[in-house]
Image (spheres, rainbow, N blue to C red):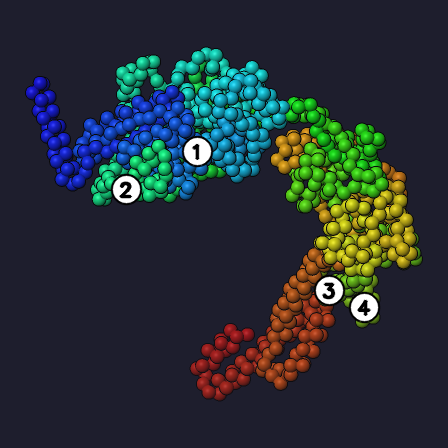
Amino acid sequence: MKLSGVMLLMIFYCELFVYRITAQASGRPSVVNIGALLSFSTNVGKVAKLAIKAAVDDVNSDPTTLGGTKLKLQMQDCNHSGFLALAEALHLMEGQTVAIIGPQDAVTSHVVSHVANELQVPLLSFSATDPTLSSLQFPYFVRTTQSDQYQMAAIAEIVDHYGWREVIAIYVDDDHGRNGIAALGDKLAAKRCRISFKAPLSVEATEDEITDLLVKVALTESRIIVVHTHYNRGPVVFHVAQYLGMLGTGYVWIATSWLSTALDTNSPFPSDVMDDIQGVLTLRTYTPDSVLKRKFISRWRNLTDAKTPNGYIGLNAYGFYAYDTVWLLARAINSFFKQGGNLSFSKDSRLSEIQGHLRLDSLRIFNGGNLLRDSILQANMTGTAGPARFNSHGDLINPAYEIINVIGTGYRRIGYWSNYSGLSVVPPETLYSKPPNRSSSNQRLYSVIWPGQTTQKPRGWVFPNNGRHLRIGVPNRVSFREFVSVKGSDMTSGFCIDVFTAAINLLPYAVPYKLIPFGDGHNNPSCTELVRLITAGVYDAAVGDIAIITNRTKMADFTQPYIESGLVVVAPVRKLDSNAWAFLSPFTPMMWGVTAIFFLAVGAVVWILEHRLNDEFRGPPKRQVVTIFWFSFSTMFFAHKEKTVSALGRLVLIIWLFVVLIINSSYTASLTSILTVQKLSSPIKGIDSLRSSNYPIGYQVNSFARNYLVDEFNIDESRLVPLNSPEEYAKALKDGPHKGGVAAVVDDRAYAELFLSTRCEFSIVGQEFTKNGWGFAFPRDSPLAVDISTAILKLSENGDLQRIHDKWLLRSACSSQGAKLDVDRLQLKSFSGLYLLCGLACLLALFIYLMQLVHQFSRHYPGDTESNGGSSRSARLQTFLSFVNEKEDEVKSWSKRRHVERTSYRSEDEMSSCNSNRKHIELSSNLSLDSATRNCNGSS
């Protein structure tokens, strides 16, 4: 064993010697200076310090990595100070440092990046997550961890996944906090969510300052709170929140990766600290499981025991990235040397011009900085944290996070987020081989135990507990006050108000509100202007007779409609009295004409089908014509006494009687309506006839009907007359267009029906030509709009909405009269199917009948060419017509007699022929007499 150990040691030193000789021959230096800027006292700094040292030792112990060159590391403590970071960076760069690992945080990174740009020294930060550091402003800054833009995207997707729309951001007011929250705002906006309140903390905020800030947060509406700060302030925020009762039921707290880092580093947490963060969600940068990761974790205990006086330090995700950063830099330096790079430095002429005792002229520009930076960005390796490869934006590929729920004395993972497929409950690397699926059905997380030890998803908002009631604008109407009536400054009533009050009472929480009249009390106010004032912040909502139309939905969110409505035309109508010719009114002239033609046609068809079989359809021509007319019109009353004997005639008659039954029933119903129901008539038939005329048109003051008529129907504005009350409606309609009034009024159906309930001389004409409804308006993305919509649906389902409607709007003054507009006559198109069926039946029967006639004629009159060869076609046709007119029984009898006669004539001819033959045979030969006689006898 000792011999083998000595042999291995000799082999190692021989290889090391060879690599050094090779390195010297190739111009590689024996040592490369690198630096590290950390904050040793922080959770990240403690872990990173150990990880970086371990990585440098591992690189230097492996001669194959740098070809015999070793890394010389110099670490400096910045203590979270931008000024100290600048000083330490300058100190490092005086010693011809080719790269710096760090800075650790965003503030120091921003400061040192300016120095790196000037001296062209790459910075490799494993923990500065500020998204703005990836900008073109800092070309020498390379982030070897995940950017906060991905962490904020994960938080935005969590918020959207649970259906929340507003969050509160508590953040440290430095580059790290401000830029991270700015990224969160962008990601939330992409999900149609927003940050409703920003609560910045100073870097050294005291507990009292945090208390004051959280009191303001508690008075706001949202209960979704994102905490993006450093570990030194984060636990204080939660402690004060616990004291203020802000970690109870209804709240949602989401902490960024600072909390998971603290849990990993300082585990186990003290019990009092754990009590302050129960139910909190936090994110941890995801590092996939691998052999390298497991080996490093197994080494970590030895590293911490040997090098930390305060005992064990937990390994967090930034420890993996710090370890991998050293290896990434070592591989990049090796690639740098392979591409012919050398460690040369030159003076910065601009620094030489600066006079003073700072000795800035001693700083040198690293001539190979560009090449080394490019080598870093082109690196492709797999480390303890997973693949280390950069995309075109300089960010690591495959960003992913674990989502952690703090419960009890520890925490549990409820899922993952990846930039590839969003939220999932399976590790992200298992999804990379599948097509990305960001559909809502594919976004999953395990159940969460929220603050207050509840598994029920919090609503995410409450009414602000700041003593201010919701300011709800109500239109101060001067007409149709059944909908909204304002009495004094605080007395409101009406249908719309009752619906809103009933909906509010169904909510599972209290809603403090105050109804504020809108309008001058002399004219009906514009509901469009009322909705606009919501966007201006004057009102928190609007309640009243507010129609949901396109331009209003662009300014606010509306609830479920609580009444259906739409624009209609109201016009004067006159009564139509019955006259001596009222019995003709049910059918149009075309309908009467076609019906009469079919009566005659069906009678003629039945006559044709029955003429040769039925004696009741035979006789002199005059009698037959009378029979056709009598039979045709007697079927109208089912009073025909002639019997049909042919199968085809019965088929046609059955179908025709069915048609007559439908026509009689329709005629009777229509005539009954005409004679018993009072009819109204108006020269205006609807919006089309009103549009084509040049008559004045009335509309309600400040109604959207005016713009609709002008914009959609291109009606000239000079024709539009504003009217402010039902009385003005009635006067203008009675005066008419020729006496300074209007031909019709265009208004919402709800107003029109209320107006007509006591004015029977007017009516709605034509069809409703728009479809909309009335709703309550709220600011964009207001969660109250959703809850009120749900309450309105409940009112509709349980019948309360109809009862409120009947209380305010039910009128029956005119309904008892049964008045209605002149009903259109029965049109031919309503019966075209029946007539078509009857016509086809008649044609089919005639065709079959004709084929039967031709067959019978050809059988009874075969047309012998020998005996009738000289007969003409006209004679043949005349014979056919005579055949058609003859009764079928007579034709059959005549044909039978003729057949017998022809048979008799043929027998006589054959007998005479046989006698002649017999005489001839007797004269010829007596021998053949017997034979001939037998033949003749046989023939007879």
Q: Is residue 200 above or below residue 635?
A: above
**In the image, which is nearer the foreground, mark 1 or mark 2?**
2
Residue 594 in view in this figure: yes
* Numbered-mark total: 4
Amino acid type for the residue under numbered disc 1 = Asp
**In the image, which is nearer the foreground, mark 3 or mark 2?**
2
What residue is drawn where x is 71% and y is 34%? Answer: 539
The quadrant where residue 479 appears: top right
Q: Counting other residues with Cα less than 10 Å from the Cα at mark 2, is it few (<14), some (14-19), or many (20 or more)?
A: few
> Which dot marks residue 346?
2
Q: CA distance from mark 4 to mark 1?
A: 105 Å
> Which dot marks residue 605?
3
SS of the residue under disc 2: strand
Q: CA distance from mark 1 to mark 3?
A: 96 Å
Most foreground residue, 243 or 624: 243
Q: Earlier in the sequence, mark 1 or mark 2?
A: 1
Amino acid type for the residue under numbered disc 4 = Val
SS of the residue under disc 3: helix
The quadrant where residue 2 appears: top left
Q: Counting other residues with Cα less than 10 Å from the Cα at mark 1, is it few (<14), some (14-19), or many (20 or more)?
A: many
Quarter of the picture containing the N terminus is top left
Q: Earlier in the sequence, mark 2 or mark 4?
A: 2
Residues at circles 4 and 3 in contact by the CB criterion of under 8 Å: no
What residue is drawn where x is 70% and y is 67%? Answer: 888
SS of the residue under disc 1: loop
Amino acid type for the residue under numbered disc 2 = Ser
